[in-house]
Image: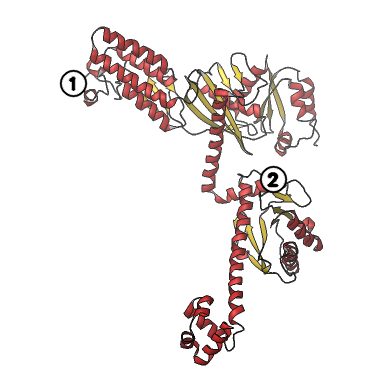
Amino acid sequence: MKETPEHIKLILKTLPEKPGVYRFYDDKGTVIYVGKAKRLKRRVSSYFNKEHDSAKVRMLVTKIRDIQTVVVDTEWDALLLENSMIKEFKPKYNIMLKDDKTYPWIAITREPFARIFPTRRPDAATMHLFGPYSSVKQMNILLDLIYKMFPIRNCKILRNNDRPCMQYQIKKCAAPCCGLISTEAYQQNIDKAMQIIKGNRKEVIRQLKEEMMRYADEWKFEEAADVKRKIETLENYIGKSVVVNPALTNMDVFGMEEDDDCTYISFLRVVDGAVVQAHTLEIDHQIEPSREDALWTGILEIKERLKGLCPTVLVPFELTLAPKEWDFQVPQRGDKRKLLDLAVHNAHFYMLEKKKRQDLADPERRNMRVLQALQEALGMKTLPRRIECFDNSNTQGEEPVAAMSCFIDGKPAKSEYRHFNIKTVVGADDFASMEEVIYRRYHRLLEENKPLPDLVVIDGGKGQLHAAWNAIIALHIEDRLMMVGIAKRLEDIFKVGDDVPVYIDKRSEAQKLLQHVRDEVHRFGITHHRKRRSKTSIASILDDAPGIGAVLKTKLLKEFKSVSKIKSASESELAAIIGPKKAAALRAYLDH
């Protein structure tokens, strides 16, 4: 470990054992990392007095030229200060939100006769803002509901007009430009629309029902019927929106999913059992954060965007730092657990969709990712860029053959596929056949000074794997490649010498790659075996027939299409092709 500079040692000696935030600076005076600590002295000193497993942390330490700290009263204060400093300085080694898309908001203008419209340019000074909405479709459904229920103007500039426009005629606007609705009545519609957007829809229904009964008491049945239509429209919308128990209300839910590069935080806001808002944040890893740090990054970002959190917050695991102003819960069962599972599913789906987009843009990236996953699952030292897979094939001990498929960088390299006719093994001995083929294949590569594969896959269980490995030992190349077997029944993956199969998720891309390699060798081997059997069956009947050479055999097969039809043909039919003398001899041979 590199020697710590003297001025850094002096700083470390004077750090307090109190909560706070620390900043690391490089030689240019740029903040490269911001962190929080329960005890500043202990946390900051740990960067310099122990060996770190992470290469990124080791790199960070080599670049530190100065340290500054801020002492605060509590860990919660440290978390908030850290979050604000990360946003201010954007340090190179901190986790960062990659959520740089311009998501839409619902805006309500701050004016006497307000407009309600979607925007991607939110301005809190002139608008009441609700969002952001990650799903434009869901936002538009909500806006359509509001436009259907309340006659709200959509013109950008409100002018004094003598006559209302077409929007008034089709009951889409209350025509405030002509004074046909009072400021108070119009604002009541806006207030109800706000409540619906916030998710307080049952309260709006209660208000509408009171309004409907008031109109009915006053014998204003047309107005009462209009309000009843609004109630039915809203109740129909709520019926489609409810996902869990309607008793669950005022609740925020955070789900989480991770891969090697990013953490995905999915947020749901639940009111009256319905998800009224959903959003997913993508957080980039620099120095590997704890799961709690990543989750807090997402929670604080949502809190800032929505100007607060609901009293109850569902999270996927216990938080060591949980302020008393919110009730953090980790549900294990019931409707709350369903909500948490939904949030986790959304985060997982977002991650998969992102990878699909990346794969479409760069197919090579996907192949490398799959190979890296396979390397990790098998504990390989090198990336399995070249994979060769072997399979035996025979029919009741006859015509034993073997085949090899080859994948390079995760893709079939069909020009490298090979067939093998078994030469030294008599009968159906799959173990001996596999040992022969493996020995012949890699003995030849060694003789020709060609590179060996990174991974060899044997289509078979432990017996065939052991037989194949005997050939590798005989060639003294045990340390130059890895060999695994795929058991035919459960498709378990076995490594040489292991009794327990390697755990690979059956749905994972790494497992699917191995299955693809295996399926290719099946296809290639079966095709070759069928051709060989067909050729042999023809030869067994016609090759020994008197007077029938290769030319006449070809003529017969071309005319009759198959050996069975040749056997059933009359002597005169045969004579028309090969002449009467040879036809008589062939007919006698076939009838014998």
Residue under pointer 2: 377
Q: Amino acid at mark 1?
A: Arg
Q: Disc 2 on helix, strand or loop? A: helix
Residue displayed at 77% across by 59% down:
467
**Distance (Cα) linking label 2 and label 1:** 74 Å
Q: Which one is closest to the eye, mark 2 or mark 1?
A: 2
Tell me the quadrant of the picture where the N terminus can be found: top right
Horizontal and vertical percent position of residue 499 = 77, 47
Q: Is residue 3 left or right of residue 537?
A: right
Tell me the quadrant of the picture where the C terminus can be found: bottom right
> What is the number of the mark on residue 163?
1
Horizontal and vertical percent position of residue 323 = 62, 16
Q: Is residue 387 left or right of residue 579?
A: right
Q: Along the line of sight, which residue is nearer the eye, 407 or 64?
A: 407
Residue 550 seen by the camera:
yes
Residue displayed at 49% across by 76% down:
561
Residue count near mark 1 (Cα–Cα under 10 Å), binned few <14, some 14–19, many ≥20: few
